[in-house]
Amino acid sequence: MAFVVRFTSGAQRDLRALHAYIGKNDSLENADYVVREIIRTALTLQESPQRGAYPPELLKRGSRTYRQIFFKPYRILYRIRGGTVFIGVIADGRRDLASLLRRRSPTA
């Protein structure tokens, strides 16, 4: 069964912000490449979304709602509902995810 992958509005904002940051501080070519590869990586969840690990920061809080995969150093947090994978957060893995999640919950 193929799953449908959907990017939440929060994940879309993350991609736009990431593109703007890389475009400003590096190059538009690299910004395009990184965003394209994050999307490509997320779309691989169509075939086997259960393969992602539970983020340790969320496990410490007792939550197994969200999983993650990586396009290093970026973390792609998602949850599965029925036949749909909802991409909720795209974050730099070098940032403190716990503080990011306190400010914004990865919801669909």
Image (cartoon, grey):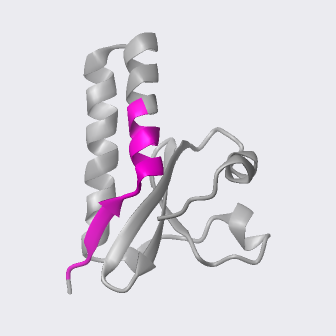
Specify the segment rendered in magenta: 2-16
Q: Residue at x 63, y 78 (%)?
A: 64
Residue at (27, 28) in percent of width and height: 32
Q: Nearer the viewer, residue 10 or 56?
A: 10
Outermost residue on the left side: it is 2
Q: Is residue 12 magenta?
A: yes
Q: Is residue 67 magenta?
A: no
Q: Position of residue 39 (x, y in %)?
A: 29, 49
- The tally of labels here is 0
Q: Where is residue 104? Give x, y as percent.
A: 64, 51
Q: Is residue 26 above or below residue 76?
A: above
Residue 83 percent coordinates (x, y): 30, 83
Q: Quadrant of residue 45?
A: bottom left
Q: Position of residue 51 (x, y in %)?
A: 43, 75
Q: Give the image quarter of residue 6.
A: bottom left
- Left or right of 1? Residue 104 is right
Q: Nearer the viewer, residue 29 or 21?
A: 21
Question: In which quadrant is the N terminus drawn?
Answer: bottom left
* Residue in front for this viewpoint, 69 or 8: 8
Choose top left, top right, bottom left or bottom right for residue 81: bottom left
Position of 51 with respect to 65 (left or right) is left
Residue occupying the point 79% across, 70% down:
60
**Residue 56 versus residue 81 in the image, above or below:** above
Left or right of residue 98: residue 44: left
Which residue is pictured at 27% across the width and 31% down the height? 33
